[in-house]
Amino acid sequence: FVLFYLIFLLCMGVPGLTMELAVGRAGKKSAVQAYKALEKDGQKWHIHGWFCMIGCVLLMMYYTTVSGWMLSYFVKFITGSFKSGMDADAVGGAFSNLLANPVEMAVFMGITVVAGFIVCSFGLQNGLERISKIMMSALLVLIIVLAVHSLVLPDSGEGLRFYLLPDFEKFQEVGVGKVIVAAMNQSFFTLSLGIGAMAIFGSYIGKDHSLLGESVNIACLDTFVALTSGLIIFPACYTFNVNPTQGPSLVFITLPNIFNNIPLGR
């Protein structure tokens, strides 16, 4: 999966990202208005812009919910809900309890939405860009520290083998087509392609910057974060006896164990 993901990222993700940035820089407007400004008479490209807007709204339902989970976990950590010595089942139970509590999820999702509106109210450059420079830099440092920590955990080698060594029997068992399609979808999802989001960022890129160069930089940084996240999660799964095939919930089961184990983690 990882191998095909990298191939699709290079062959389809970077060109697609370059084109979407180009639409944004040429249109200098929102997704719908950019297509209207660029389309010729009689063309209907602006209809795709509306689908982009719908896609962004639907995607934000996912992002704000997951961000709410993270905020809830942050509160749980500083209040001592995750204690040293908790096993994987206890940590997994905390996540199950969160999913079973719609009020808690709604409250933290609401806080996330309000915080997002406040940041965006200052504009892309004065709001989002300014705070992202600080938070993303801190995140990069954090994931590097966590990756190094996970690599020295007991039984981390098993996790690395699961993560990085191809298993052709499993590949055939799941289905070659399914793995390829999943990897291709992930390459588009991770770069936020097809929903006009990157076109919005492209509208702020000056003509003194190469769009292909910007696309390569974005793809490289995004891939670095994605692969490094795997180096954090999968070795820890085998250390803390967590099933590594649980999907997106895996991060909410392994990270509390990691932070409890690392010095000054809490």
Image: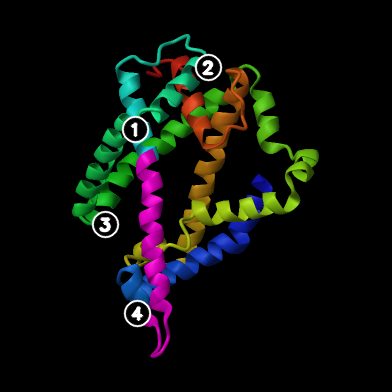
**Which residue ends up furthest to the top in the rendered image?**
85
Label located before the other in sequence (3 or 1): 1
Tell me the distance, in whole angstroms, between the alpha carbons under discs 2 and 3: 42 Å
Q: Quick one: SS at disc 3? A: helix
| Mark 2: amino acid | Asp
Q: Amino acid at mark 3?
A: Leu
Q: Which residue is mark 4?
A: 36
Q: Residues within 10 Å of mark 2 (few under 14, many from 20)?
A: few
Query: Which is in the foreground here, disc 2 or disc 3?
Result: 2
* Marks 4 and 2, how far apart at CA: 53 Å
Residue 228 image point, x, y percent: 54, 37
What secondary structure is the magenta-colored segment mainly? helix
- Report the residue marked by disc 3: 124
Asked if 77 appears above or below 160 in the picture, the reply is above
Amino acid type at mark 1: Pro
- Residue occupied by mark 1: 102
**Would you place residue 147 above or below residue 131 in this image?**
above
Mark nearest the camera among 4 and 3 is 4
Foreground mark, 1 or 2, reads 1
